[in-house]
Image (cartoon, rainbow, N blue to C red):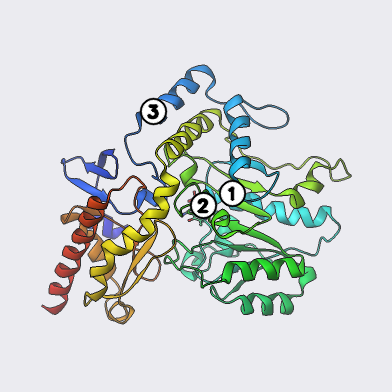
Amino acid sequence: MRAVQASGELILERGEGAHVWDDAGNRYLDATAGLWYANVGYGRTEIAGAAAAQMRKLHAYSHYGDVSSRPTTDLAERISGIAPMADAAVFFTSGGGESIETVVKMVRRYWSLVGEPDRTVIISRERAYHGLAGYGTSIVGTEAFKVGVGPLAGGTATVAWDSPEALEAAIAEIRADRVAAFFCEPIIGAGGVLLPPKGYLQAVQGICRAHGVLFVVDEVICGYGRVGDWFASNRIGLEPDALTFAKGITSGYVPLGGVVVGKRMQEPFWETGAAGVWRHGYTYSGHASAAAAAHVNLDIVEREGLVARGLELENEIAEALAPLAAHELVSELRSGFGAVAAVQVDPALLADDPGLSDRIVLGARRHGVLGRVLVGGGLQISPPLVITRADLDELASGLAGALDDAAAAHHS
Ligand code: PMP
C-alpha cells in the first residue's frame, strides 16, 4: 500500500488489440493479457454487444435447481464438446477461486457419496497457485500467501512441483485411502511459469489412477487457446477427472469460471440417494449475460484461429525473447508450452536486491511495455493471442531497455 501511495496509480483508459492506453494518452504493449485472460485482446465491441443484448432481454436469473437460460445451457454443451473428457458436465462459477472452492468440495463429497468418507486429503504442488479463496489459500504452494490469516483448511499436503516420485511417496505416507485428489496446473503460472518436466503430467495422472486418487487439472490459465489447444489436457492427451477454468472463457470481458467434470465423478451426484440435494452454488453461477459474452468470445477464438495462434506463439515468443538470455540481469528464459514464458531475473542478484524485478517492470512502462513480476522474481510473458510478430519485437526491445536501465542503476 505504501509503495502505491508513493508512486501513484497508473490509470488505464482504453485498449485495442494487444495495447492499452493510460489517461495521459501513453500507449503500452500488454505483456501479460491482463492477468492471463485477455486472449482475444482489447476493444472487442462484438462481445460488449452480445452481453448488452442479453442484458436487455434477461440479464440473469438464479440457476439453482431446474432453472437455466439458453446461453448458459448452450455454453455448458459447447464446453463439454471441447473438453478433454468424454460426456463432461459443467458447473459455472464467477472465476477461478470459486472454481477451486467448488472442486475441493466436489471431490470430498464424491468420496463421501461412494462410501469412502476418509478420503479427504488434497495434495497440491510447491509453487502451485490456485487462487486465494479459502481452499485456494489452503493449498497454495507459496507460503507468502498464507501469512497472517490464521488457521486455514485442514486435510491438505504439498509435494515437490516437479517430481512424480514425490507424489508417490506422499500418497504412501498419507495412505491412499485418505487421499481425495491431486491438484495440478499443467504450467505453474503465477508461481513462476514453471513448465512440467517431460512426462511429468502423464506420470502423475498414472499415479493417481493406480491409487484411485482423483486427478484435478487447474486450467484457469491454460484453457481456451493459450497453450495451442482448447486445454493443455487435450494437447498432451490427459483425461482428468475434473478440470477448472476461468479467464480465457470470456477473455475477461465479464467474470466467469467453472468446473468441468468427467463421468466417474458425475455418477454419484446424479444418483438419487440418501445424500439428497448437493447444496452448493453461487448467486452468479450460470449468469446468462456472462454466458452470452463467452459464446462470442469463443466465436472469435474459432473464427480467427487463435488456438492455432497460441501454438505458433510458442516459437515466436521464444525467438523474440532469445536475445534477452545474454543480458547480465537475466539467468534464464522459460518457454516452450504455448503463449506463456518468463524472463528470470538472476536469483543471485535478487537475493541482495529483492526489489530489482519490480523496478524493471516499473521501468518497462517508460519503454512502452506493461508487465508484471511472478513469484520468484521472473517477468511474466503471456500476451493477448492477437499479438503480432512485430509487436513481440516491440515487447522484447521494451524489456531490453528496462533491463539496461536497471543494470546501469545497479552499477552506479
Ligand atoms: N487457478 C489458477 C491456475 C490461476 O492462475 C488463478 C488466477 N490467476 C486462479 C486459480 C484463481 O482465479 P481467480 O483469480 O479468478 O479467483
> Residue 207: x and y, percent?
69, 71
Q: Are marks 1 and 3 in contact (CB under 8 Å)?
A: no
Q: Earlier in the sequence, mark 3 or mark 2?
A: 3
Q: Residue at x 56, y 58 (%)?
A: 136
Location of the C terminus (image quadrant): bottom left
Which marked residue is nearer to the observer: mark 1 or mark 3?
3
Kind of residue at badge 1: Ser
| Residue at disc 2, secondary structure | loop
Provide the secondary structure element on which disc 3 rests: helix
On screen, 275 above or below 170?
A: above
Structural crowding at the residue carrying mark 2, measured as other residues with C-alpha within 10 Å and reported as few (<14), some (14–19) or many (≥20): many
Estimate how packed mark 1 is, as few (under 14), some (14 to 19) or many (20 or more) residues with alpha carbons within 10 Å: many
Residue shown at 38%/64% (left/top)?
Answer: 374
Which mark sits nearer the N-terminus, 1 or 3? 3
Q: Quadrant of residue 18?
A: top left
User: Farthest right residue?
Assistant: 274
Residue placed most toward the observer, 334 or 20: 334
Crowd around label 3: few <14 · some 14–19 · many ≥20 (10 Å): few
Q: Residue 378 placed where, x, y %?
A: 34, 68
Q: Earlier in the sequence, mark 2 or mark 1?
A: 1
From where the camera sits, is residue 9 visible?
no
Residue 220: mark in rendering: 2
Image coordinates of residue 410 in percent, x first then y, are 17, 76
Q: Is mark 2 within 8 Å of ligand 1?
A: yes
Q: As rendered, which of 30 and 301 lies closer to the eye?
A: 301
Ligand 1 under 8 Å from disc 1 Cβ: yes
Left or right placement of residue 30 versus residue 199 in this view: left
Q: Which residue is mark 3?
A: 46
Label 3 – label 2 distance at C-alpha: 23 Å
The residue labelled by disc 1 is: 99
- The residue at 22%/51% (across/down) is 390
